[in-house]
Amino acid sequence: MQFSFTDEQDEFRRVLRRFLHDKSPPAEVRRLMETETGWEPGLWKELTQTLGLAGLHVPEEYGGQGFGFVELGIALEETGRVLLCAPYFASAVLATSAIMNAASHAQKLALLPGLAAGDSIATLAFAEPNGRWDSTGIELTATPAGGAFRLDGVKSFVLDGQRADLIVVAARSKGSTGDDGISFFTLAGDSPGLERRGLSTLDATRKLAHLEFSGARADLIGEPGGGAFALARTLDAAAIALASEMVGGAERVLETAVEYAKTRMQFGRPIGSFQAIKHKCAELVLEVEHAKSAAYAAASAAAENAEDLPALASLAKACASDAYLRAATDSIQIHGGVGFTWENDCHLYFKRAKSSEAFLGLPSEHRERFLQRSGI
Amino acid sequence: MSAITEEDVRSEAGAWLASHWSPELALSEWRRRLADSGWGCPSWPVEWHGRGLSLALGDVVQHEFNRVGALGIPQGPGPTLAGATLLEYASDEQKRRFLRPIITGEDTWCQLFSEPGSGSDLAGLTTRADLDDDGEFVVNGQKVWTTSAHHARYGMLLARSNWDVPKHRGITYFVIDMHQPGVVVRPLRQMNGHASFNEVFFTNARVSSANVIGGVGNGWAVALATLAHERRMNDVRRGAGPAATARGRVYDEYRAETASVMEPYKWYPQRAGRLDLVVERAQATGRDRDPVVRQAIAKLLILARTAEWTARRARAARLLGRPPGPEGSLGKLAASHIARACAEVHTLITGAAAMLARADAPLDGVIAEVLISVPAVSIAGGTDEIQRNIIGERVLGLPREPAEDVGKPFRDVPKNLAG
């Protein structure tokens, strides 16, 4: 396991941080979150074509940069820090991981270069209104139809699902249950038989969609019925990526709270000189550093494809969720009244933290999974 | 420095061990060889029983020692606290007198810092050291929570030598001979029944001005060095002792030495919470099927894993020579959270039997001892509150709380009544 970043990785972080600091300031986040699409095509182009961010962990033979999960984790930490409004998580993490885990070589050759270059934006539709985050929650069915398949059912909580060019769908064969009969399919976002509706979200920087499939035609990727493992793998990767994104946000929130505690004067002194505030900040440092360690350990396990990857993915998701929410909540408390105003940025992070807590499964669910995956 | 590689150190240490180490040596003879060669304290300067190696190369040496089962210098406050402090602040004459017997184990040391009236506010200490007409200091007062005082030869003593200046400026750091009539050591019984520490009473005890370390009135700076080494010692993983199966005279003598030095610490595993027992006890009792208990166990295991990784991140940064990040200051506070969470989970698992002790309690009283020892973790070696101040002020740069005693002659500062 890797306990420090290399000089190259640190440099990558510095470059990216500077870039995102300039391109995604809070005012821009606020502007984009009010739009229906939620991102700016020009910035997406720069992120993908200048920085190569979308193909960071995609092998070079599929048009990517050929880096690993540690670099992807750094990228997400930095995008999480600035609440970047871009389809990065949907396309580069969810859809790309699903294709890398499920598709054949030829399908990867066909699908990944476009995603890695940012020319095409994809997402993964797997959860459904039942809100379960694994294969047991999948009810949408795929039926063979003239060399392709027809999809019938409903997907929900689909990240950037309303605007994605390409939808990767996890579906099951009729009559199958549990891990059996799970397959992945792709179809264009504007396919006939697919109705998309944007959902009102607690976190406006995270667009979610409700997708209704009534006989939409889709192409199979990978082996029919053998997708459960690929789905589990993809969700582990997503959990680790989300943990990285969350620790980036948590660290930023903590910095903001500390800056405020140093300058806000009450009773003739900065509030950060009071132990009630100082100790709250100190506990946050502990929790945020622990969450960073968890995210780094999990990313390192993913990079090495380690045996304990599933356990560490759940560990990191649970730990980072708790740390982010606590940091965001305490940051509002430290800011006092102004922290509850729309004008202050605290709520943007709080809402991202709250929404990320539920996304991919609550911390309590992941703690339970962590135990089971650790053989306890 | 850069000329010395890991491989150089490995082969040099290996060659030296091959010709000097033997399990049949007397422990005193082995320690003499360590002191003569510098391999016992590889990161100490060459002229003072060391080899002037970096911390990272010191680890390489430790690894070579472990590989052949060679023993190190004695454990305890002598080398780690007194030795390291003396290296930094003592005169050459003092180093000549004190350092070598520390490494050979002939002299053991104790730390005389805390007092009944000054715990977190160490600089508010009131043990006095008054210079008499013969140029000797006369010491009166009381120290507390002193480990190993009953068999220590020397004490690192902080005493107030000037009451007319602000508190930090009137303190002097002494090396005091513990074997004298003015020093009385008494065991101190704790809430868990053990008596691991001592109270030390000074009644006209005497200490020569030749034993002042770092100058009269400069004791606070020296004390900070000792405290920094104490924190570092807590961070550093102790080298594993010899395997129980290791045979030879030197191992037998080492085990006897360790048994005596480590006796006060035998409840420390319980104080830390006995994380190692949590899962097996939960499974043995069937409590691992209760979802509430499972959540508590998972939280605890995650906390412990992430704290361990955080410590390893800090260590990796140190070895790479990178500036310390916040992760380096967190271990103490994390250990405190872990211990408390352990006690909570052990209680959940144990249920009604958590009311029992000793032979009537689970594991012959071990769990009971956890429950009544854990409260020490968040106090000993700096309370959680002080740790949070340190993190808040030194890591985050938050302003200090205004203090009532700053800038006043210590004589005028309100104090606790003498104990």
Image (spheres, coloured by chain):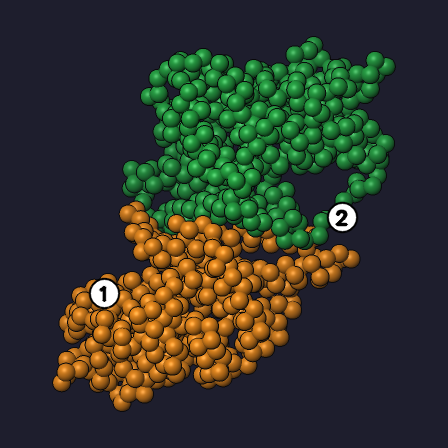
Chain colours: A orange, B green
Q: Which residue is mark 1?
A: A228
Image coordinates of residue A67 in percent, x first then y, are: 38, 63
Dot 1 amino acid type: Ala
Residue at the far top in the pictured view = B181
Task: Please state the chain letter of the residue tagged with numbered disc 1 in the rendered image.
Answer: A
Say if B94 sits above or below A287 in the image.
above
Which mark identifies residue B402?
A: 2
State the separation of the CA atoms marked 2 and 1.
Answer: 61 Å
Image coordinates of residue A309 in percent, x first then y, are: 33, 55
Say if A100 sits above or below B287 in the image.
below
Q: What residue sits 43% from the left and 62% below the top?
A: A71
Q: What residue sits 47% from the left and 42% below the top?
A: B338
Secondary element under disc 2, as helix, strand or loop, is loop
Q: Residues within 10 Å of mark 1 (few under 14, many from 20)?
A: many
Say if B310 sits above or below B270 in the image.
below
Q: Nearer the viewer, mark 2 or mark 1?
A: 1
Task: Please state the chain letter of the residue tagged with numbered disc 2 in the rendered image.
Answer: B
Q: What residue sits 56% from the left and 63% below the top?
A: A252
A87 or A159: nearer the viewer: A87
Q: Quadrant of residue B133?
A: top right
Image coordinates of residue B127 in percent, x first then y, are: 74, 25
Q: Do marks 2 and 1 share a subunit? A: no
Q: Quadrant of the N terminus of chain B?
A: top right
Q: Is residue A165 left or right of residue B344?
A: left
Q: Quadrant of residue B130?
A: top right
Dot 2 amino acid type: Pro
Q: Residues within 10 Å of mark 2 (few under 14, many from 20)?
A: few
Q: Quadrant of residue A339?
A: bottom right
B269 or B349: nearer the viewer: B269
Say if B65 sits above or below B260 in the image.
below
Secondary element under disc 1, as helix, strand or loop, is helix
Answer yes or no: is residue B387 visible: yes
